[in-house]
Amino acid sequence: MRTIAIILFNLSSLIVFAQSDKLTLDQTLGVALRNNKGIQAASYEVEYQKQLKKTSFDLPKTDITLMRGQYNSYAKK
């Protein structure tokens, strides 16, 4: 019985000091987003793609047309 009381006393002191400061949900999410390296890498990748998109353009296909002879009316041979 005495050992159970000692164990409970030790566990109660650990529980009290486990969370000394309270955070709101927004603060907790902010800390998680700042410390998560995967999310930071993904945000850098998005920024990289945005900057890369500004430098690209679509080169149209080359079109060559040849008009020879009389093309305004029927050709007379």
Image (cartoon, rainbow, N blue to C red):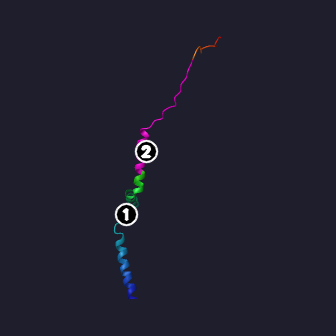
Q: Which label was assigned to residue 23?
A: 1
- Distance Cα–Cα, label 2 vs label 1: 34 Å
Q: Which of 6 and 50 is in front in this view?
A: 50
Mark 2 nearby-residue class (10 Å; few <14, some 14–19, many ≥20): few
Q: Which label was assigned to residue 49?
A: 2
Dot 2 or dot 1, earlier in sequence: 1
The type of residue carrying mark 1 is Leu
> Where, by quadrant of the figure, is residue 73 drawn?
top right
Q: Where is residue 54 in the image (x, y as percent from the top left)?
A: 42, 39
Q: What element carries label 1?
A: loop
Residue found 41% across the figure and 61% down from its top: 25
Residue 63, magenta (yes or no): yes
Q: Nearer the viewer, residue 73 or 16?
A: 73
Q: Position of residue 65 (x, y in %)?
A: 55, 23
Residue found 51% across the figure and 29% down from its top: 62
Work out which quarter of the rendered image holds the N terminus and state it: bottom left
